[in-house]
Amino acid sequence: MSVDRAEERTEGAAGTEAEVVTTAAAALRYYSVAPGVRLNVRSGPGTNYTVVRILPEGAKVPIFCQAPGTTVTGPYGTSNIWDNIDNGEYVSDAYVNTGSDGYIRPRCSV
């Protein structure tokens, strides 16, 4: 996964150039996992990938990017969209309340 960075250059009071770096995480929104669900986090966008950890009930997750993968039916419908919540960690979008049946973030680059 790659996270885009936006860079802003400003000139300081002494005339030197200072660099301010803002990551996409600064403006990142967190989404709720379906109530009462302990959600498997997988190493890739599909049920054929290994489970790397399990999110507890009441978890909220960031979504950095999204990728197509195995179709899953969950509390929020049936979807083949998988949400990248950390480097190499994916959850099925069918279990995340994004308010949309489609993509809400950029596609993950491989």
Image (cartoon, rainbow, N blue to C red):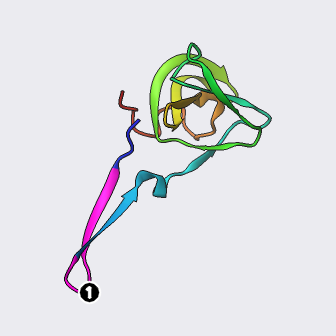
Q: Which residues are magenta?
A: 5-16
Question: Which residue is located at x 23 percent, y 86 percent?
Answer: 14
Find residue 78 and report its image quarter.
Answer: top right
Residue 75 drawn at (x, y percent) = 70, 28
Give the farthest residue toward the bottom: 13
Residue 6 drawn at (x, y percent) = 32, 56
Q: Is residue 1 magenta?
A: no
Give the farthest residue toward the right: 36
Q: Quadrant of the N terminus?
A: top left
Name the side, left or right, on which 11 lies relative to 62: left
The residue lying toward the viewer, choosing from 94 and 37, is: 37
Question: Which residue is located at x 47 percent, y 52 percent?
Answer: 25
Find residue 37 and report its image quarter.
Answer: top right
Q: Amino acid at mark 1?
A: Ala
The residue lying toward the viewer, choosing from 75 and 62, is: 62
Name the side, left or right, on which 22 lies relative to 16: right
The residue lying toward the viewer, choosing from 86 and 102, is: 86
Give the farthest residue toward the top: 48
Q: Which secondary structure lies at badge 1? A: loop
Which residue is denoted by mark 1 in the rendering? 13
Give the farthest residue toward the left: 15
Q: Quadrant of the C terminus?
A: top left
Residue 106 drawn at (x, y percent) = 39, 38
The residue lying toward the viewer, choosing from 96 and 21, is: 21
Q: Is residue 13 magenta?
A: yes
Local crowd size for mark 1, using a 10 Å CA cut-off: few (<14), some (14–19), many (≥20): few
